[in-house]
Every structure is written in structure tokens, then in C-alpha cells.
Image (cartoon, rainbow, N blue to C red):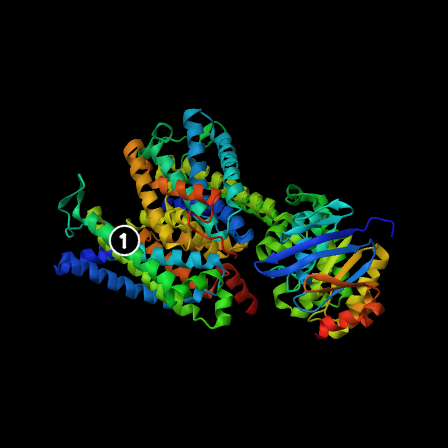
Amino acid sequence: MSATPLLSVRGLAKRYGGVIALDGVDLDAAAGERLGIIGPNGSGKSTLFDCVTGLIAPDGGRVALDGRDVTARPLHWLAARGLVRSFQKTAVFGTLSLVDNLVAAGQARACGGTLAAFAGGGAAARRTAALTVRALGLLDALDLAPLAAAPAAAISFGQQKLLQFASCLMSEPRLVLLDEPLAGVNPLLVERLVAHIRRVNREAGTTFVIIEHNTDVLLGLCARVVVLARGRVLAAGAPDVIARDPRVIEAYLG
Amino acid sequence: MLAPLAASDYVLHVAVLSFIYLLPALGLNLVYGYAGLLSLATGAFFGIGAYASALLALRLGWPFWLALPAAGAVCALVAVPMAVPALRLRSYSFVMVTLGFLVISESVAKNWVGLTRGDMGLIDIPRPRLGGAALTSVPQLYYLMLGAAVLAALAFRTIVRSAAGRALVALRDDETLAAAYGIDTWRFKLAAFVLGALLAGLGGSLYAHYTAVLDPLVFDVFHTLTLLTIVFGGGAGTLHGVLLGTVVFLFVPEALRVTPQWRMVLYGLLLVVFVFRLPGGLGPALTRLGRRV
Amino acid sequence: MLGALVAWTVLDRLAWPYPAAVAVAVLTSAVLGFAVSRLLMERLLAMPFSMAVLATLGVQLALQNGAQLLWGASPKFFGGGWIAPVQVGGVGIVGQQLVIFLAAAVAFAGLAAVVRSTPLGRAMRAVAQNREACDVVGLDVERVVRVTFTLGVAFAGLAGALMAPILVNVGTTIGLPMVLRCFAIIVLGGVGSVPGAFAGGLILGVAESFVAGYLTLQLRDAVGFAILIAMLLVRPQGLFGVRVRS
């Protein structure tokens, strides 16, 4: 690869007292890639995302977006530059309707600034209308259209995960970090979601980095997979190679 | 509204007070109901706005129509240096700082005698003038204050329906998530706080020019507690809730001349009961009831 | 406030001696604290913080104004206590102040010992640090809250009864300045630190007297809050506090 990777992580480290969560992780995600991250529980996957997105300050290492150092930059700053992430636990805006959830997720990029968000008037209305159209389209693609006006707190966990996924796409990001997007999702909808990821990746060139426990789906979806164990990169490469790697098998079973 | 034709001067007076109170109540609603910041500073800005407006009119001879926006501006300006460090704090520290701000404001009003005449207060604050004549009768002022209340409610509605309103609700529901989607949560909290201060300050100015006298009692925690009851009891995070709250928790008790002690006991019990039974407030509860019927 | 008022009632209406008045005040406060804890505080554990503020504010409103309805709005003269002057190291103070200081010293020493060494104290610290972990470990959080709150209210009642002779006139308004000072002291000393509270109290007391003596008496109330705000902005964990992960 000659082009600068979209996301570049070097030597990322994080410890909590005596527990080492991340022990010098190196990772690259090329633009337009579908990168998977797997690993047994406690291997540091979510911590990796947290450190990359500035939720947790890493103890060491660098994170670069498009070659530019963005280590420990705050979450909203990264989102404004096209880096969006989802959360493992259920994370939606409970009192807002599903549609409003999505519009809220997309408006920051569309509005461009705190002051502008307060404006009423024609331009703002058109923006909201455009976002609403996008939102309804996404809801439709994920079979959530009938619930569009329901408050997000009223839908099931699996549906909330889907809503989260859709929210991530609203701002048309360059890079999406998905933390276990399939957990709790109806198996019938898992296919829809995967197909949607493929489509967005193909049509918009959006890069996806996906943590998943559902290794079957992940190995089928991603062109490259990274295995984390005990805070370190154990192996990286094509899915079929990874699946046969004895070290990986041992890490999961041992 | 044709009330001035029918109702007594006292009832009109209570109505005017309700209109005036609506402004800081909306301010608090914005800060607490939408941005999710429990702040006791609304009462402080009410008092600061009142004093600013009164002093500008008395000392510099500014007409009401200039003093009003100036009072709002003063509050907004004061709110910024207060909020910038305070918003960094966790919720219990933030509440204490806002309470501290209220206490200190009261202390300043009482002790900076050279500026505020301390406990003696300010008198003869000029009434608003319209078309060359001062509005002095309660029915006249009634219409003015009604207009102010309507404008404030409309402005509030515009704000909460805008993208900013959505952003505020989002950050109230889940601050980290809102940030994850690019919402600059700190800036929005600051904006909500400043707007809340602005609204409270405007209300304070109206209050000063309506009652024509002002003393440090305007900073009394009584006002802040009433505002809290109105917003929380009426329905934080909604417009109709606060309107309802103002009627139920201010207009009715004042009109019935319920003694302050009993009012406070009732407010107190109400707060406790509502926290457990009706945290959404009366407004949303009645809406739900209406839907079921 | 209630401590002082109850003590006054015992003294004035029942004509019992002052120590008995203090004891009754402490007892009634403890009972009240227990009741409030059972009915309110423990149930607030599951709710967001702002709800707890509003509910406790409501209790304070109801109690203060209820007291005003019961006892009347005018302050009462408090006749008990050891108000005879006493010489301590060349400085004349009132005997009651000596009693207060001794009581405070004993209370602080006792509390510090409890928090540091006893199982209850350990449980308190555990609840403060990580409530979810407590549930996992099987620690009865509600019971800890009940004991802590009851104790706290009893102390407040004691303070009210002991301060009454100094204040001379007790009414329903004496509570608020005290509470504000408490906030300032806790923040100054560090939330969760008993030696911190002791130090905070001393520092605040000295600062207030300094301001009252050399600047102006009226600003005394604001001193506490000025210190509080300054501390929160500069060093939120206080002098002795420890930063706790929320």
C-alpha cells in the first residue's frame, strides 16, 4: 500500500493501576477498507476504540487520521472530521423519536457550528428536511420505518443497536468504528445490516473498522482481520489465514 | 385577552406577575429541562437583570425600552465567565456553584450600598413609556407584560424546535453519545446557560419596572424555589408544562392569597412527591391523560 | 434549625435542664433522620442526581416552612446553655464555646475513627467510591445510607442545640447560613474526608472572623461561598479529598 492509511495507530498503551488494557497496539486501516477486529473478552478491543476516539486518554502511543496526529482529541472534534463510532452498550437518545435521533446524529456535520444551530428560517428548515429524508431512508433499509415516530427508549435492545448503526451513517462519515454492532440484533436483520455495510462501503467508500464476537459473520464481511489478545495484536491478515492460525485458536480456547 | 375588563386589579396584578415570572421560568427550563443542568442561578440573574435595568434607568436616565435589552445583555455577559469554569464541574459541584452565585449576588446587592443602596433599596424606578406617556395602571401594564410573555414563549418555541433544541435534548439524554455524533456539548451547554440568563435578566427588568421598587429581597431563595417548582412541577423540557406550571404554582396560589409559608410547604411536599411519582411534571401527565380519554 | 427549636421547646415549655434539652434535640433529630432516610433517601439511590437535589430541597422547604407555621416566624430567645464567660489563655470566651469545641473534637475524632477502622466506616467508603461494586459484593447500600443519614441528621440536631445559646435568638432562618457554610467546608476539606471537614471548618471560621473583623460584617455570609467557588474552580477535590472516578 502506498497511500497513507486513513487511520493509523502506533504503540497505543493504556493501563488501569496494575491491569494492562492495551500493550502497544499498532494498527492501520486503509481508506475504503473493511477491517475486522476480533479477540477474546478482555483483550482490549473496546478500550482500543475508546483511546482512538479520545474518550480515554491513552498512556502512550499515537493516533493519526489521514496522516494527521489526532491523539486524545475529543469525540466531537473527530466526528466533525468524519470519524464516527458506535457503542457496545445501548446508546440512543431516549426521549427523541427514532427519526429525531437520526436527524440529531446528522445535523452537526450539516449545520457547521453551534450558533448556526439556533437559527430558524428557511435554510435551517431545508437542512432538517434533507436530513429527515435520509433518516427515513435508513430506517426503511433497516426495517424500522413503522417505528419512526416512537421514542427511542421504547424500542427493543436489538432495535436500538440498529438505530445506533443508522445514526453513525447519518453524517456521511469517512470512517466508522463499530463496536459489536450485531450483538442483540435479530438474526434476520443481521443480514440486512451486513448488506448495508457492504453497500455503503462500496458506494460511498466509507471505511469500516468493526469489532465483533460473531466471528463467522465478521470473517465473511471483512477483507482483513486483526486479532487482539491481552492488549496486543496477536495476528493480522486475511480472514481464512487468521481462522487457521494456531495462535488465534489457542487464544480463544486457552 | 379581555381580562382587564372583567377582573379586579389584584387578579390582574397576579396575572402580570405570572407573565413576568414566565421569562425566568423559560430560562430555567432551557437550562434544566433541555440542557439537563440543574442550576439555581436563574434567580440570581433575575435579580441582576432587575438591578441593572433599574440602575440604568435611575442613574443614567435610560428609558425602559433601552434598559430592558441592556439588562438582558448584562446578564448574558455575566453568565459567560461564570459558566465557563463551572460547566467543567460535576453536577453536584455545579449546583453548589450556582447556589453560591445566588448567595453572593444577594450579598453584593445588600452590601454595595453605594451602587444599590443596600437594604434601603431603589425606589421610583420609572415605568415604561409608550407614545410619550408612562404606563402606570395595572391594566395598561397588563397588556405590555402579556406581550412580553407571548414573545418570550414564541422565542422559546423557536429555539427548542431548532437544530439547537434537538442538540440540547440529545446531550441531556446522553452526553457522550451526542459528542460522538459531532455535537459540541460544551458549547451548547454554555449557549443554553447564557440564554437562560438572558431570559431571566429580561424578566428581572420587567419586574423592576413594574413594581417600581427594588430591594435585595429579589435575590431571596424564595423566587428560585418557586421557579424550580414551576419548571419541575409543570414539566421540565416542555413548553406547555412550564406554562401550566406558572398558572398552577404561581397564579393560583397568589390569586388565592395563600400565605408564603403554606405555599412553601406545599411546594416542598410537591417536589418530593413529584420526584417519585411524576418526574415528568404535570404538563406531560395531563397530556397522557388527555390521550387516553 | 430543628435541633435548636426542639431544644428551645424543651427548655422553655417543659422547663427541663439544658443537657436534657440537647439530648431530646439529638434524639428527635435522629428519629427524623431515620424516617427521612427510609422514606426518601434510600429510594433516591436509584435516581439521577438532580432528582435527589429536588427532593431534598423539597424536604427542606417543607420542614423550614412547616416549622414556621408551628413555631411562628419570630425568633425565640434561648435561655439555656453555659453562657458565663471563661478565661482561656488570656482570651475571654463564653463557656458554651468551650463545650462546642470539645464536642466537635470528640465528634470528629470519633467519626474519623469510625470511618477509618470500623466495618461500617469501610462500608461507607465503599458506597462512596463505587456503588455498583457494592451491590455485586452484597453490601447493603440502603442500610449504610440509613445509618449514615440518621447519624448526619443527629449531628445536625446536636449542632443546632449546642449553637442555640451562642445565637441567643433562634428562629426558622438559622438553618440556611449554616447549610451554606457546610457546603463550603465540605468542598474546602474534600468530599469524603473527615480530617478535611475539621480543617475546612477551622479555616472557614478563621476566614469569616477575619473578614468580619477587618473588612465588613455583612460580607461574612459571602465569604463561605467565595471560598467554595474558588476551591471548586481551582481544586475541586478539596484539600484532603481524593479524586474519585465517577
Residue C18 in percent (x, y) is at 15, 57
Residue C160 in percent (x, y) is at 25, 54
Q: Give the vertical position of B80 relative to B40 (above or below).
A: above
Viewer-side residue, A151 vs C179: C179
Question: Is residue B201 rendered to the left or right of residue C194?
Answer: right
Question: Is residue B263 rendered to the left or right of residue C86?
Answer: right
Residue shown at 29%/64% (left/top)?
A: C30
Say few, some or many: other residues with alpha carbon within 10 Å of mark 1 (under 14 / 14 to 19 / 20 or more): few
Going by the picture, which residue comes out furthest to the right? A2
Viewer-side residue, C38 vs B148: C38
The amino acid marked with disc number 1 is Ala
Residue C39 seen in the figure = no
Question: Is residue A180 rendered to the left or right of residue C142?
Answer: right
Viewer-side residue, B248 vs C143: C143
Q: Quadrant of the C terminus of chain B?
A: bottom right
Residue shown at 29%/32% (left/top)?
A: C214
Q: Give the vertical position of A148 relative to B162 (above or below).
A: below
Going by the picture, which residue comes out furthest to the top? B60
Viewer-side residue, C67 vs C131: C131
Residue B291 in percent (x, y) is at 57, 66
Q: Quadrant of residue C149?
A: bottom left
Identify the secondary structure beneath mark 1: helix
Residue shown at 14%/44% (left/top)?
A: C85
Chain ID of residue with mark 1: C
Residue indicated by mark 1: C105
Residue B144 in percent (x, y) is at 48, 39
Residue A46 seen in the figure = yes
> How many discs appear?
1
